[in-house]
Image (cartoon, rainbow, N blue to C red):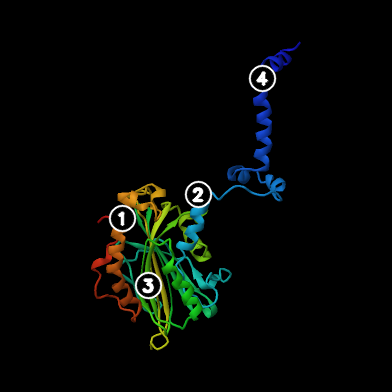
Amino acid sequence: MSAVSRLWRRAPAWRFFLYASVLFLILGVLFPTPIVARHMAWTEILTRYLPSWASPSPNAQDSTASNDNANPSQPDTGNPKGDLTDPARFITPDITLAMTGVIPFGGHSLPLPAGIWHPVLSGQYGPNARMSLNVLARTDRGIVTGVIIASTTDQDVPRDVVEDAYNHCHDDRNYHSTVLADRPDGKTECTYLTAAYMGPNASISSDPLIQLAFKRLVTLGFPMPSLFIVASWLHSSGAQESTKGSSSITYLLAPTQPGTVVLKAPLPYWDKNMIARAPAALEFLRRVDIWFTDWVPTLRHGMLNDYSSALADRKPARDPAAPEE
C-alpha cells in the first residue's frame, strides 16, 4: 500500500479538506469576486447567464454616489454632457499659470477663494456653444486642496433643464441645502453641501468634461484625496428679469491634513448619517457651511454683474481647505 493510499484511509479530515478545496474552487470560478473577475476576465463567459449574488463593493457605491453628488448640475441647453468630439471648443491651458483674486468668466466676474489657482480645462459646450465652462485647481505642496467647476450662459435655459439642476438642492444625501429663490416665473437660486467620493481612475463624476479635467490632474501627477466636500451655488434668471442666464459654481474642498491627502477623519465617517460620530469631520463641515454662507453674496455679485477686476467684499475668501499663509 502506497503512502498516499494509507493517508487517504487514515486521514478523514485531510480527505474532507481536499473535497472542500475542489468544491470552493468551482464556486470561486462560477461566482468570482470583483478582484478575481477583474484579473480573470474569462470567468465572464461562465457566469454570463448565472444570477449574481454579489452586491456592489463600497468603492463602487461611493463611485456611484459621487457621480450624482459631484456633478455640478450644469444648466445646459440640450447636451449637459458636453461634446468632446470638437477639440476646438475646449483647451487645456498651461497649468503653471497662476490665478488669484478675480477672473473674467462669461462676461462676469468669478471670484476665487484664497490661494493660487491653476487652469485645468476651459471652453464652450451645448448647442451653438452657449455654455461656458472653466475648471481650476488649487494646490498646496503639490497636492490638490480645491477644485472649481464653473459653468454659465447669458441665454435662456429650458425650464425642465433648470428644474433638473435645481433637484440637486433637494437631494437627501446633502449635508445641508438652502433655497434662496424659487419663483413661478422660473427664477431659482439655491446652495447645497454634499460629499464627492473619488472612484477608480479619478472618476468623481459621470460628466465627461469633469472626468477629463480630473484625469488631466492625475496625468500631470497631482495627488488628490479620496473625498471632497462639495459646496455648490445654482442660479437661473426669471422670465421677467432683463438679464437672462444661468450659472452653476461648484467648489470641491479637500478635508485633509495640511500638505497631505490624509483625511481629517476616516472615509466612512463622512457619510451624512455617520459624520456626527467624527468631531474632526463635523467641525470641518461646520466651517465650510459658515464660509460658504458668507461667500455666496460675493459670488452672486460677481456672476450677476458685468466683469470688474475688483469685487466689493473679498473678506470671506479664505475657505477651510485653503493653504496656510
The answer to whether the residue labelled 2 contacts the one labelled 3, judged by CB atoms less than 8 Å apart, is no
Q: CA distance from mark 3 to mark 4?
A: 70 Å
Q: Secondary structure at mark 4?
A: helix
Instruction: Give the residue type at disc 1.
Output: Phe
Q: Which mark is residue 284?
A: 1
Q: Is residue 187 left or right of residue 219?
A: left
Q: Earlier in the sequence, mark 4 or mark 2?
A: 4
Q: Is residue 321 visible?
A: no
Q: CA distance from mark 1 to mark 4?
A: 59 Å
Q: Residue at x 41, y 49 (%)?
A: 268
Residue 107 to residue 87: above or below: below
Tell me how far mark 2 sits from mark 3, CA to CA. 30 Å
Give the residue number, with chain letter if any, for mark 4: 12
Per the rendering, the mark at residue 172 is none
Residue at 29% in and 59% down:
286
- Mark positioned earlier in the residue sequence (1 or 2): 2
Q: Residue beneath label 3, please?
A: 190
Q: Secondary structure at mark 3?
A: strand
Residue 311, horizontal then vertical, whole percent: 27, 75
In the figure, 277 relative to 157: above or below? above
How many numbered marks have been drawn onto this rendered protein structure? 4
At label 2, counting other C-alpha atoms closer than 10 Å, the crowd grade (few under 14, some 14-19, many 20 or more) is few
Q: Residue furthest right?
A: 1
Circles 4 and 2: CB atoms closer than 8 Å: no
Residue highlighted by disc 2: 58
N-terminal of the two: label 2 or label 3?
Answer: 2
- Using the image as rendered, state which of residue 67 and residue 172 is in the foreground: 172
Crowding near the residue tagged with mark 3, few <14, some 14–19, many ≥20 C-alpha atoms within 10 Å: many
Q: Who comes first in sequence, dot 1 or dot 4?
A: 4
Give percent across and percent down for residue 297. 29, 73
